[in-house]
Structure formats: C-alpha cells, structure tokens
Amino acid sequence: MAAGGGASSAPHAPTMDTRTMFLLLHSVTEDNARYFRRQRSEASRRFVAAFSRLQEDGRGLQPLLAALAAHFAAHDLDLATPANGYRSLSKVVRRCVMHAVHKSRYVAASRRSVFFRAGHNLMEVEAYSSALRQLRALLYFATSLLAANRHGDLFFSDHERGLSDEFLRESNTMHKGCFYGRCLGFQFSPSIRPFLQTISIGLVSFGENYRKHESKLGTAATSIFTSGKYAIDPELRGAEFERLTQNLDIHFWKAFWNITETEILASLVTLTATTVRVNRVLSVPPHTIAMPLAIDPTLTVDITPPVAHSGPGPVQMRLISYELREGQDSEELGGLCGVEPALGVEARPRGKRVPPSPSLIVHFHGGGFVAQTSKSHEPYLRSWAQELDSPILSVDYSLAPEAPFPRALEECFFAYCWALKNCHLLGSTCERVCVAGDSAGGNLCLAVCMQASAYGVRMPDGVMAAYPATLLQATASPSRLLTFIDPLLPISVLSKCLSAYAGLEPAASLSSSAVEKIDPLSVFRNDTSVLLRGIRMGASAWLSSLLDSGRNSTSHEMMRKSCSETALSTAHSSSCSLDSDTDFVLCPTCPLPAGPPVGAEEERERVREAPSRFPRGFQPLRSGAGNIRLQSSDTVRNPLMSPLLAPEHTLRKMPPVHLVACALDPMLDDSVMYARRLRSVSRPVTLSVVDDLPHGFLSLSSLSRETRRASALCASKIREVLAGRVPPVLPPYTPPPPGPHMATASPSPPRSPTTSPHSSSSSAASPPRASPLRRYSPQLSPGMARRPSPVHSRSPSPTQTAAPLPPASPADAPYPSSASPLTPTTTAPPPPAMDATAPPPNPTAPPATNTATAASAPTMTASLLSPTAPPSLVLAPSLLPSAPDPPPAAPRAHRKLERLVPKNPASPPPPPPPH
C-alpha cells in the first residue's frame, strides 16, 4: 500500500460467519497486544491501546449485529430483493471488521521484520480502531430507529421528531475524519477507491484556494500544487475534509461540482466516450403548449411556461442521437439551437438520414438540484443512445438555490410536453416514451409523472429512476446513517442541498453579489492568462510551504499523531485549520476560518446534557461542532417534492417504475419504501440493487467494470420500457415476524432453477446448504506475508439447526453472497396477498403490520440501550434463537480452529458441525 494511505486491499468476506469473524478479530488482536506489551516504546504503547480498543468494540458489536440480523427480512421489499438500510449498516460494519482483521494479521506477520514500518502500520490500526468505534455508535442509533419505527417501516412519522433532532445533533459533533483519511471508501469496490481518494484530495485543495482567484480554473490550477501535502498525509486530509463538509455553504459545493462543466475537462471526457452524430443544445422559448387530453384527444389543455421565482424564460435542453434521423437537421430545429464551444472532434462521418425512431427518452440529470448540467452526464448518455437506438432529450433545468422548488419541476414538465408535441423535430414518432434520471433527476421523473396525471396528458410508458431521493427531509433512517461515513454524500452536504431546493437558504447567501454563478458555456472564455497566473502562484506557494515545513519540523518527534488524536486534541489548531487569510463563503452560523468555532463548547455541552442512546461506559469520538440545523417547511411535505408522501389515488395512476438503487447508498431506503408504496396500490414496480458502488455511479460509468455493468443495468430497464414489457403486479410482501423460529430449520420456498439458495432471508437452513464457515484468503499487498486461514469449509447436515449467536442463516449475512450484485433474483414467488379487509397503509409505512413483532422491537432496544448495561451487552432471551445440543465429538477441522482461537468465557466458540 502506498505511503499516502488509503483503504487496504483486504477483500470483502460477507460469507464468513459473524461469530467466527469476531473470534478471529479477538484472537489476532490479543496476539498482537501480548507481543507489544513486552516492548518499551511509545509506538508499542499505542499499538496495545489500539488493539485493546478493537477488542472492546468487537465485543460490543457482536450482539448488535446479531440483533439487527433478526429484523433484516421484515424491512425488505420481498424475498427476492433483500435490501434495506439495516442490511447495509451491517455490511459496512462487517467489512470494517474484516479490514481490521486483515491489517492485524499483517502486523502479526511482519512485526519482527527489520523492514516493518511501525509508524505507518500504527496509524493504519488506529484509523480502523476509530472507524469501528464510530460504526458501533451508528449501530446503537440504528437500534433506536428499530424501536421507534413501525414494523417494516424505514422512516417514522412527523410526530417523532426527536430522533431527527438527535440525528442532526450527533452529526454536528461526532468525529468523521477517520472515514475520510486512511479508511476512505473501505466499504466500496477496490476499483472505486483510487477515484474517491483523488476526489477527496481535490476537494480539500480546492477548499484551501477557494475564492483566492477570480476564475475557478485558476483555483483548480493552484490546487494542483497544494494537493501534495494532502496526498501524503491522510490524517490532515481527513481533518480538512470533515471541516469543509461541516462548515462551507452550498455555493462552495456548486463551484466544486461544476468543475466538470469546464470545456477542458468535459472535452477530455467526451474524447473517450461514444461518438454520436447529433449533439445539439436547444433553447425552447416560453410559449404556451396545447396538449391533447389522454382520455379524449379531441380536447386540449394549455401547458403554460415556467414562471416560478424568476418569471417566464426559455428552457435549455440537449438532443443526443447516435444516428442522424429525419427532422433532426430541419431548419425549425436549427432555429432553436444554441451555440456551444466544443474542443472535441466527432470522428464519425455524417452519412445519410435514417427514419425516425419509434421511441424517445426524456432524461433529467442529477446533481443535488444545485449543480451540473447535461454536459457532465454526456458520457453515459452517448452510450445509451447507441445501445438503445433512440434519441435522448436531456433537460438542463434551473438550479437551486437561485431557482428553488418548483422551478425545476415546471421546466422539466414543460420540456416533457414540448417533446411530445414536437417529436418530429427530435427524430422520433413517440410511440414509446421513457423518462429517466438519476438522484435528483430520478425525483423529477416521478414528479413529472404526477404532473402529467394531474393535467390529464399522456403519461410516459415507464420510468427508470436510479438511486432517486423520494423523501426530501432531513429524516433519520437506517441507510441515511451512512451519510456519516459516505465521502460523496455527507450528511451536511445532503442537508444543504435539500434546504437549497426547498428555498430555505438564508437570503444573504442568495443575494450575495460576491457569489459567482458557473456558466458552462462561457467559463472557458479568456481564461488562458488566468490559468498561467494561477500555476505561477501555486508553484510559489508550494515552494514556500516546503521551506516553512522544513523550518518548523521537529526532529525529536518520532511519529505523527493518529487520525483520531489529531482531530480530537487539535481539531481547530493551526496544523489542521484553514489559512486565516482565506476569504471563505460561510453561513451566518459557521465557525471562523481559523481558531475555535463559535459556539463549539455550547454545542458539546448541549450534547452532554441531552439524553444519550448509548449504554453507560461508551461514547463515540467527538470533534468540533458543525452548523447543521433542522429546518422545517410545509414545502418538503409536498408530494411533488417528496414523491414518497403522495396519496394513494395519485400512486395508482403511476406508469411502470423501474428503480435502480445502491446497497451502500444513503438513499437506499428511499427506493425501498417507494417501491413498497407502489406495490401496496397494485402498481408494477421493480427494484434492482447494485453492490459495492457509491451514489452517483452513472457519472463514473467509464471508471471501472463494475460501474459499466451498473450503467448497462439501467439501460436494460429503459429497454424494457421501450419494448413494451410491463413487469408483473405483485401483491404486498408480508415478512415473517422475527423471533426464535427464524433460526430453526424450515422448508425453503419454491424457486426456479435460477433462484439463489440464499435469496430468502427468512429461512435459516435450506438443506443442503453450504456452511457459512468458508475459507478466508485475503489478497495481500506486495510484500505482505500470506498466513493460512483457520476457517475451513464443511457442509452441514440437513437436520442441523443454527448456532445461538449469530443465527446461521442467510439473514446473518447482510446480503446473499450467491446473488449477483447487479441482477437481483426475481424468480422467487411472493407470499399470498393480504386480506382485503385490512386498513389502508400509512403513506410511509408498509401495508402489513405485525403487532407482536412491533412490540418485540422496543424490548430488544431497551435491553441493548439500558443506561445500566455494560459495554459488553447481552441480548434478551426472547431475541436469541434456540441452540441445539453440541455433538459429542468435534471434527478435526474444528479442533484446529479451537487451537488457534484462545478460550474466552465471555464469547464461547460455536458448536462444531457434525461430520
């Protein structure tokens, strides 16, 4: 691994039994702690402290994971789609534990070598120790959500605002820098981590030079020279990343995200993208459109142009087509085309015109409602135009906070109606129309369909929404707890984007004349001299910083402090703070650029006085207070802004919806709950969950094989809509109540030959089934010694039941290991439909409610979060599955495991499987 630090290369092992995983963690950390106790150095003392913390947090995490695993199935969409925030949190914790195990095994194998880098490995172990402590706090909070929510619900109602307040209060003070330094992106695919590290380095460098230059290109040029110190110092990068995400306002994020809109970067990306024959920017004038009604085409309804906030104005669009079709080169369309500078060269010849396509795709881009245009989404749109053989019209709607809700929705609906009315200019007959979008664009897709239903015009034939935001409120949910650790969607950035779209940004920020609005069509204009000046100033600053660091360095300091110590002891010292002469754009409640933040002590005191949901003796790591505030408004309850809150009569008119979500995305619960609401009103809907990818993977479609496969999955869903294939209407899912019976052997549901044996989370033992105890063989980095794993594979008896802790069932793993991460299993038949006499579902609750299970959740949480409970918690007997009597003799493979793992009365080894 590079000296700069990053997530280690330990592979993910979701198939390892939870009990075995923690036994391995305890064994290897105890061995390392015993070795370093015999040493007499500061590094050895810190090694012992770090390994002791790993052991302590491992003992606290094991019962929490086992308790949550019993409730996984109750929050899934169905048996074929095991996905929800509780599974995602469990998966993240397991991967962090496996990274800690892998790093500890490397230390044990290399600690006696003369080439062993004690300082580097010490900071690696301390970083994962801090990350595991913070993840333990998130699991405690997840158990609180499990007790507060109704059975199967992932969000709670408005009258339970206490958890949302506490969610934001904890996000203000909990230390998050450990997730942005050496542990950056440990939960994602290894092919994504270098990109995330580049983004984090660019972000902190851009923040250091923000507003020192008139041009954002000059800022980017200077950032190249200041990024070196953040590349070689992960602790500094993590502290600065946390500071920026907590304090800078939405205009900083608009400026940073819009770097991809500059002509130089956009042209470099499009040079490697698919070449197309039509790529034209359109500006549609604000004229009223007479649309025929869907029920009677002889009648029309007038669609007025957008007028919210800024009055009538043209709507910008981009037409992309792989082939030149009839109408796309007409004079009428040419009169709507704007002028866009282009540095790329289209190598394909013009050729002849082809007939119009029977289909049309209307696309709405993502960007948190505040940034980006269709230009930054061109690479995957070009690929879709070729694969789907259909023109694509991408709408460049106005962005917040200058144009908050409902301006973007008005422009998107107006563009949709204009496309239907003028399809002959777009090279299509509009026999089949699909609306597609990602993130914020997915939200607009669903809202446009509701608008079309309200006006009575033609509905699209289907929707493809990738990782959409369906509830635009700062509401806590299991998956939204991942915003504490997500480098692309931190909680502070998410709340700022939602507040900007809701029109809750302060008036001073909206009217500030110092804020520069990025114009992607003119940012490259007259920028060469500014770029050269920025490079010259950046080089000078870089040389000065090297000289200053050489004069200020102390030779007697043997090693740097760890990420947690740097952020906790000197969270706002000069070594981790921004330059005092930097002119930052801050909110009125933001801390100053240098020195202790305003109100930091008051915020910490308020956190100490608030009732804690953590057990006595445990507290997460804390850092400086942020400025996230919970802002409420009736606007966020508008169904056109939060489609999850739409009434049932509106949902019954929705077209077929295809949702593509990410298992590790903070917005996962939005997709799961929206799919459950559509299914509760008997509407066709599918939910596909991709694994190991972050939010916004479509913009990274050319980065790795995983992102290309995920983009192809989205294209396949659009192809289904254009081909007229409607998914079947499935009855609502009635999950089995969690309890001891979930861990006993039960017959597996019938399935087709393509169904994975692990696709159901409710059956614990489906004979015959592969044992969860499988060989763990990490792919070590160059120079690391490979040590044999003590875990061996052995098939259990068909009559064997699960061990007491944890349940030896597919629910023990966060996601089925044998299911494809990109194509969810859809062949398992659903359970019978609910009784027709049942009361109608709550807008944010699943249709079925099990009172016995709902009553058991508070009991479980009360036993876990009791103020008198010790750090090593014991589960309530009602939540533990019954354990079978152990066999009289253990096989040879299990005796080998017992010899490796020391005896521990607090956590006895699992009963051995029979021969």
Image: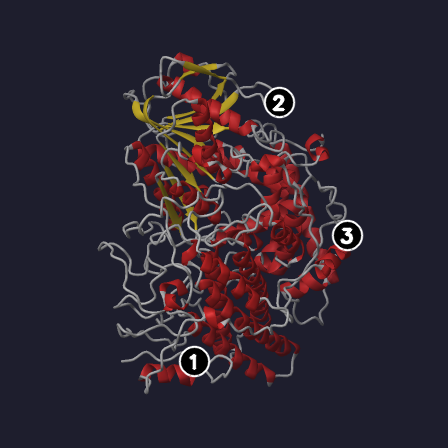
Visual colour scheme: secondary structure
Report the amino acid beneath label 3: Gly
Q: Earlier in the sequence, mark 2 or mark 3?
A: 2
Crowding at dot 2, Cα within 10 Å, few <14 / some 14-19 / many 20+, comes out as few
Q: Which residue is mark 1?
A: 909
Which element is circle 2 on? loop
Q: Is residue 543 visible?
A: yes
Specify the farthest residue to the left.
753
Q: Earlier in the sequence, mark 1 or mark 3?
A: 3
Tag on residue 545? none
Above or below 724: residue 248: below
Q: Earlier in the sequence, mark 1 or mark 2?
A: 2
Tag on residue 599? 3
Task: Quote the CA–CA distance across marks 1 and 2.
Answer: 67 Å
Q: Residue at x 62, y 22 (%)?
A: 310
Q: Residue at x 51, y 80 (%)?
A: 906
